[in-house]
Image (cartoon, grey):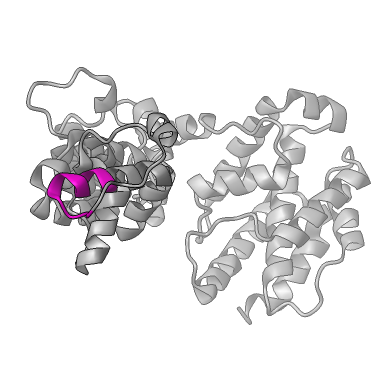
């Protein structure tokens, strides 16, 4: 809160002459100065008069420093707009603590409305006419409770939101809620989307991959819908839906480069496997750019070498394309191992044996992971 206070004070950019004039005027009223004030009349005409000395922030800070007072300024002494701006930098926990000191300010509806919409970007209740006595603070508590319930049991969490009128039982509304929310556990979210394919379809359509390079679009996709760690057809479903959506968002690229949903399907698997190959510390002989181009073009013959080479450069410079939902290195490597096994099985079952060299290279270090 202290950092927010000083940031706002700096943004006000009060003029030094204004604060000095208010300080001299207050001293004259209290009789603390001896003799007439030395001030230029022309300068006084240019300087606005201070009507309410207590609202002069610079003067307030000077007085506090002179009295050697400790702690922060009482927010109730500041203009309400400035106090609300300061408190807007707080999270929900700190705002609750601030409301114990400044009850009216800490319970301001605008503050809690901002917290709700910044944490849960879309809720069906936002678009409805709110009843009298509605409280955004209470809504925040319900949203937080529902998110915790979802992270323990996805079905019960969604049912909780619907029972409170926060969400409407419609796949598109649920997909928007998931898309604009970062409070949901990615493992539970993956379980829920695997069961609700209608919600998954709507969630995919919310992505806009226009004018995005393929690896960057795949990273953005996996940031919202995490790749599975276990074997199964769910991963194949994700890649298939992404391929069709990417082509639908980039019709010009499809014509110029010769991409198709099947070609994007193959390139996505190649990029994921290349990501594992280049980022895993257990792979001693890394896949070279020439090898990647050769193996990929055998599966997607219509794609130019330059385009495939740019794909390799992107992975080499930026890194992994699959967001696996964890920051711990060991867990990430274990997830990469199971993902590589699943990809190899799917590619071979699909008859794409032209990538067998690429996959066999992955087999050499699967056990070491």
Residue 186 in percent (x, y) is at 41, 54
Q: Going 28% across and 58% down the picture, which residue do you hit?
A: 62
Magenta range = 24-34
Q: Going 53% across and 76% down the picture, which residue do you hit?
A: 330
Give the camera-side residue of 140 and 166.
140
Residue 149 in percent (x, y) is at 22, 51
Total count of labels: 0
Is residue 55 in sight in this rendering? yes
197 versus 341 height, above or below = above
Say left or right for 138 vs 261: left
Specify the farthest residue to the top: 129
Q: Is residue 308 magenta?
A: no
Q: Is residue 25 magenta?
A: yes
Q: Going 77% across and 39% down the picture, which residue do you hit?
A: 263
60 versus 368 height, above or below = above
Give the camera-side residue of 72 and 149.
72
Residue 18 in percent (x, y) is at 37, 41
Is residue 168 in sight in this rendering? no
Residue 103 in percent (x, y) is at 9, 46
Give the camera-side residue of 222 and 135.
135
Give the camera-side residue of 285 and 20.
20
């Amino acid at each position: 809160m202290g950092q927010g206070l000083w940031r706002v004070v700096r943004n006000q950019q009060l003029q030094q002459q204004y604060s000095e004039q208010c300080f001299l005027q207050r001293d004259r009223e209290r009789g603390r100065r001896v003799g007439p004030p030395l001030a230029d009349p022309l300068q006084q005409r240019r300087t606005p008069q201070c009507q309410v000395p207590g609202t002069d922030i610079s003067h307030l800070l000077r007085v506090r420093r002179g009295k050697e007072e400790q702690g922060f300024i009482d927010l109730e002494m500041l203009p309400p707009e400035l106090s609300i701006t300061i408190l807007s930098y707080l999270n929900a926990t700190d705002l609750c603590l601030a409301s114990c000191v400044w009850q009216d300010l800490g319970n301001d509806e605008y503050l809690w409305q901002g917290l709700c919409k910044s944490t849960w970007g879309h809720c069906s209740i936002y678009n409805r006419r709110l009843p009298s006595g509605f409280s955004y603070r209470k809504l925040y508590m319900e949203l937080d409770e529902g998110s915790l319930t979802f992270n323990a049991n996805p079905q019960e969490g969604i049912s909780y939101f619907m029972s409170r009128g926060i969400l409407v039982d419609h796949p598109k509304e649920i997909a928007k809620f998931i898309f604009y929310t970062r409070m949901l556990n990615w493992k539970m979210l993956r379980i829920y989307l695997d069961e609700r394919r209608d919600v998954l379809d709507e969630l995919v359509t919310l992505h806009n991959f226009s004018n995005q390079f393929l690896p960057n679009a795949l990273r953005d996709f996996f940031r919202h819908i995490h790749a599975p760690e276990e074997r199964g057809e769910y991963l194949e479903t994700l890649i298939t839906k992404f391929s069709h959506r990417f082509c639908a968002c980039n019709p010009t690229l499809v014509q110029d480069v010769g991409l198709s949903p099947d070609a994007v399907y193959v390139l996505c698997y190649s990029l994921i496997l290349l990501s594992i190959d280049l980022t895993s510390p257990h792979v001693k002989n890394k896949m070279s750019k020439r090898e990647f181009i050769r193996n990929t073009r055998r599966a997607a013959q219509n794609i130019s070498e330059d385009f495939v080479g740019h794909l390799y450069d992107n992975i080499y410079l930026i890194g992994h394309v699959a967001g696996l939902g964890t920051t711990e290195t060991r867990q990430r490597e274990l997830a990469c191992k199971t993902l590589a096994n699943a990809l190899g099985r799917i590619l071979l079952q699909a008859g794409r044996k032209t990538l067998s060299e690429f996959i066999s290279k992955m087999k050499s270090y699967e056990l070491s992971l």
